């Protein structure tokens, strides 16, 4: 057994097996034309498992010209809060089944409607296209739902997009959401110990194991010093953020960035909580079979129920 396969005794056997399988899986295809169908198929397999485990009703429609998937627990959610879900995928993929995958367990466990936003993707659409889509959906939503009953969450690129959406709402003078979730990503460079450690956890990984925000096609032409783009270095912007839940894992290349974002939010006076899973990896909760994923859904559901009422 390699050093990368060593785990603490608290890591579940399914998680250990999943990580070992990960070490033998093919790496992300090098070009976008191959990566998009690769991740669509990958996410569809995970979504099939989620739909077999969680009973939800799904409706695809448009809000403000943006495709969304309206996911609700079977039987309906009544007047429960509404969450916007912003999927991950480097701003380049994750649409369709990926967007649904990140919404289905949360809708079922939290007992709320989740609107998964199929925002425009790079490189065809660069910043601020994705933010524009999210804000358009949010504007339309709060015409009928009290903003304090609305939450926004996202994983990886979706976490960064969540912070961009909040920054835009603050900038535009719109009422912000009641709470947000920032999972496995943050508006901070993916650097630090977590990025350096990837070669320890994944023997296949080279120096490019952790993506670089500044090299993502979505940010082409964007000013990364702009608080509307990356807000973490701007305490005056962060001070307006709502209650925030941050989640990462020790084998996540973004763990250092998420940890730094948590400290920045606390320094700005924001009610922020950070949960770090030991021995797990980037976006671990996409696999509904892991006990740690079930734990993650419960943490997220409890947070939004408490914050949104």
Image (tube, rainbow, N blue to C red):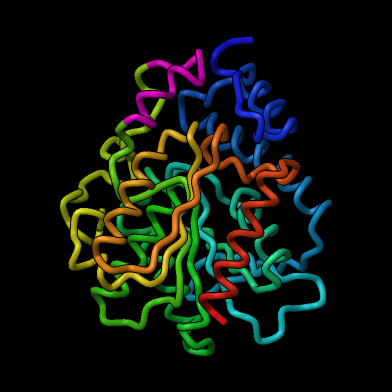
Residue 302 relative to residue 162: left or right? right
Who's the residue at 78% across and 45% down the image? 49
Position of residue 97 measured from the top left corner of the image (x, y, whole percent): 65, 50
Q: Is residue 49 left or right of residue 287?
A: right
Q: Residue furthest top?
A: 1
Q: Does the magenta run of residues contain 185?
A: no
Kindly identify the residue that appears in the image at 33 percent across and 68 percent down. Answer: 270
Range of residues picked out in magenta: 193-206
> Is residue 265 in sight in this rendering?
yes
Q: Quadrant of the C terminus?
A: bottom right
**Whether residue 120 is visible:** no
Q: Which of the 4 image quarters holds residue 131?
A: bottom left
Residue in the picture at 69% in, 29% down? 18
Q: Quadrant of residue 11?
A: top right
**Quadrant of the drawing holding the N terminus:** top right
Q: Is residue 263 above or below residue 256?
A: below
The relative height of residue 222 versus residue 252 in the rendered view (above or below) is: below
Residue 81 percent location from the top left of the image:
59, 79
Residue 73 point in image, percent of width and height: 75, 70
């Amino acid at each position: 057994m390699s050093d990368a396969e060593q785990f603490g005794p608290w890591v579940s056997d399914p998680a250990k097996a999943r990580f070992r399988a990960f070490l033998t899986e093919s790496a992300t295809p090098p070009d976008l034309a191959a990566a998009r169908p690769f991740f669509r198929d990958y996410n569809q397999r995970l979504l099939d498992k989620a739909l077999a485990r969680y009973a939800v009703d799904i409706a695809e429609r448009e809000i403000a010209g943006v495709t969304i998937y309206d996911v609700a627990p079977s039987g309906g959610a009544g007047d429960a809060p509404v969450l916007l879900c912003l999927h991950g995928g480097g701003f380049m993929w994750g649409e369709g089944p990926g967007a649904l995958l990140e919404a289905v367990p949360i809708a079922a466990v939290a007992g709320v409607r989740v609107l998964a936003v199929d925002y425009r993707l790079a490189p065809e659409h660069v910043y601020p296209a994705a933010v524009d889509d999210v804000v358009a959906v949010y504007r339309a939503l709060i015409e009928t739902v009290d903003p304090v009953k609305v939450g926004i969450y996202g994983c990886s690129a979706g976490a960064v997009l969540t912070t961009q959406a909040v920054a835009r709402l603050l900038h535009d003078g719109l009422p912000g959401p009641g709470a947000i979730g920032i999972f496995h990503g943050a508006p901070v460079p993916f650097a630090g110990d977590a990025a350096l450690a990837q070669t320890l956890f994944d023997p296949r990984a080279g120096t490019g194991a952790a993506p670089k925000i500044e090299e993502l096609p979505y940010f082409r032409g964007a000013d990364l010093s702009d608080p509307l783009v990356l807000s973490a270095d701007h305490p005056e912007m962060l001070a307006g953020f709502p209650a925030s839940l941050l989640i990462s894992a020790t084998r996540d290349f973004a763990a250092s960035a998420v940890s730094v974002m948590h400290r920045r939010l606390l320094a700005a006076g924001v009610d922020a909580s950070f949960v770090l899973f030991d021995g797990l990896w980037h976006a671990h909760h996409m696999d509904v079979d892991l006990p740690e994923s079930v734990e993650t859904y419960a943490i997220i559901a409890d947070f939004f129920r408490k914050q949104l009422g």
